[in-house]
Structures are given as C-alpha cells and as structure tokens.
Amino acid sequence: MSDLGRLEDLPADYVAALRALNLVPLWPSLRAVMPAAKPQPRTVPTAWSYAALKPLLLRAGELTPIEKAERRVLVLANPGHTLEKMQASSAIYLGMQLLLPGEWAPSHRHTPNAVRMVVEGEGAWTTVEGEKCVMHRGDLILTPTGLWHEHGHDGDQPVVWLDVLDLPLVYYLEASYHVTGQRQAQQAAHGERSHLRAGVAPTPVFERTKRAYPLLRYPWAEVKAALSSLAADQPDLESVTVTYLNPETGGDALAILGFYALMLRPGQTLALPARSPASVFHVVEGGAEVKVAGKSFTLAEADTCCAPGYEAVVLRNRSSSAPAFVFVADEAPLHRKLGVYEVRG
Ligand code: GTQ
C-alpha cells in the first residue's frame, strides 16, 4: 500500500488558506478513516469484575441519595474510547445500577433504547408504560425508545442490575434527549404471560396488537429452560444460543442492539467467528473464560466484558461438571440495517 501525502508536505500558507474556508484535504487522512482491510477499533477488550465494583456501587448508595442521582449508576467505560465518553463500544453503553430498599427512580422517557439484566437482589420492579415488570435475577426488561419508565423497590436488600443502552450511537447522532414525567399508574398487563407462550399471540377480534413492543419482560426461568431443552434435544449442537425476540414480528427485541443468551455445556469451549459488531458478555450463572484479540478474561458470576468487532471470540466454561449461562449484547441489528454486517469466519 502506497503512503499518501502528508499534511506537513503541503505549504503552510496553502493549509491556512484551506482552513480559513473550512476546507480540509482528504488525502493525508484517507487511510485513517478507511484503514486497509479491517477497521482499527478504539474498543479494547475490557472486563469488569462484579466483586470489585460492588463495594464502590454500595458506597455510591451512601454518598448520593437517589433524589440527587435520578439513576445511581457506575458506568462500565472502555478506556479505548476514553472513560469520559462512557461507552463500552461505539454503540453500546453499560452501567451497573443500584436501587436501595424503598427508593424510587422517577419516571422518564428518552430516545436511547435500554434493557436491564438483573444481577442481584429481589423486590425491585420497573414500570414501562404502566406495565409493572418485576425484576428477578437474570430477567431481561426492555425499556424501548420513547417509552415511560421508572424503577421502584419493595424488598429489603440492595438491588443491582446491568443497564445496556444504545446511548453512544444515539448521542453521536445528536438525537439523545429525555423528558421527565409523573409517577405512572400501574396496569395489570403482563406481556410475558400473554406473549411468552410457545407459538401463540393475543388476537382480539382477529387483529394482532399494534403495539411495537408487546413483550417487555423476559423471565430468566423461561430463557434458561429454553436453553436447557435446546441442549438436551440437540446433543451435537455446538452453539446453544437463543435470541431475545419481538414475538409479534419475530425480529430482534430492539432495533439497534441485539440480545442473546447462551449456554456453555460442562467443559465446553465455543469458538465464535469474527463478526463486524462489537459484543458484550455477562455471566448469569457459572463461570467462563473469554479470549479475544490476545486478551484473556476469567469471568465469575455477574462479571462482564466487552469485545471489539472483527475479532474472533473464544468462550470456555470454567466448570467441567455444570453448565454456564451467558447473556450477550451486540450491535448486529444496527450493522444489518446499515448493510455493514460481516462474518469473517
Ligand atoms: O434507568 O433509565 O444506566 O436513563 C442510564 C440512563 C439507566 C435508566 C442508565 C438511564 C437509565
């Protein structure tokens, strides 16, 4: 590959004349914005230990009342993007949120899409457009773009969950904003009771619902059972993985980020091909080793790591006797919509 001309090779008066007119020569920067063969991601493989961050999150509970924080969150920031940017990858934001007994995180809605993966503690709930979604360990709760949501806690121990948002992308698009609102009246609707049933959907007077997001809570018990049956029914299946779907469309649960759960059989090593989207791995049950781009992370339950796109990932179950369950988030729906999705094999 030939080197293109450098900015320093141009006469200073010429560069100054360009700058005065808000003009920039492309060729000195062309290779930086379109590197050869493969992107040069800022996202670096990074892991966050739950045991290490939990005391600091609990300390935030002592230092900052919920009224002062609105959302009490420690952001899992990728140093490759600089910590101030608060991003795990170019499109993914991760945060560990703490809610203490009796606290209420007030109602708001915003343009970024969010999901919560419950990490620890019982008794919390998220109300989404009036639908009360109880939060048990491993449950996935959606708060899609534009929908009102608030969090409450009737239990007696701290509750922690992992927030996954497409905030970095929506912020980059200059489309990120929020609106605050009143406490929501709770309805008796439970999407997971009407929609999370094998192959059927509510059809009043033979019309399907027009709600864009009919299912807001994916109970871990159901997802784990689906993975366990899949593994039992197909002993030769290597990648025991399910996708969180919108049950009305059969498409991804949300428009920008994709969400999956996978089971590693006892002792299993699973090689995932290099794909264009960046991804996040969060251990729900068991322990896993994650190898990506020359780095290796040993993850325990509730630990989280991120991997840049265009890199193969190897997952290994640390136990030879018990399965491990991993929640995965990636940028695949976005890449597919943009037409840039690739599997490199
Ligand atoms: O719980 O609504 O981690 O609005 C970041 C922004 C959580 C939330 C975050 C949010 C929320």
Image (tube, rainbow, N blue to C red):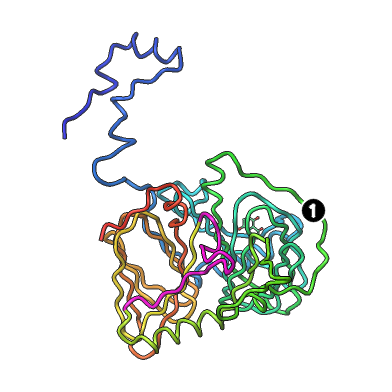
**Left or right of residue 189, residue 214 in this image:** left
- What kind of residue is marked 1? Gly
Question: Percent x, y for residue 52?
Answer: 50, 69
> Residue 247 magenta-drawn?
yes
Residue at image coords 37%, 53%: 341
Which is the main secondary structure of the residues drawn in magenta? loop
Rendering quarter of residue 280 = bottom left
Extent of the magenta region: 238-256
Vertically, is 297 above or below 21? Answer: below
Is disc 1 placed on a helix, strand or loop? loop
Residue at image coords 72%, 56%: 70
Question: Percent x, y for residue 211?
Answer: 68, 61
Vertically, is 62 above or below 79? Answer: below
**Left or right of residue 302, residue 101 in this image:** right
**Left or right of residue 71, residue 88 in this image:** left
Rendering quarter of residue 231 = bottom left
Q: Nearer the viewer, residue 133 or 195?
A: 195
Q: Which residue is mark 1?
A: 181
Could you tell me which quadrant the N terminus lies in? top left
Could you tell me which quadrant the C terminus lies in? bottom left
Q: Which quarter of the rendered image does ligand 1 occupy?
A: bottom right
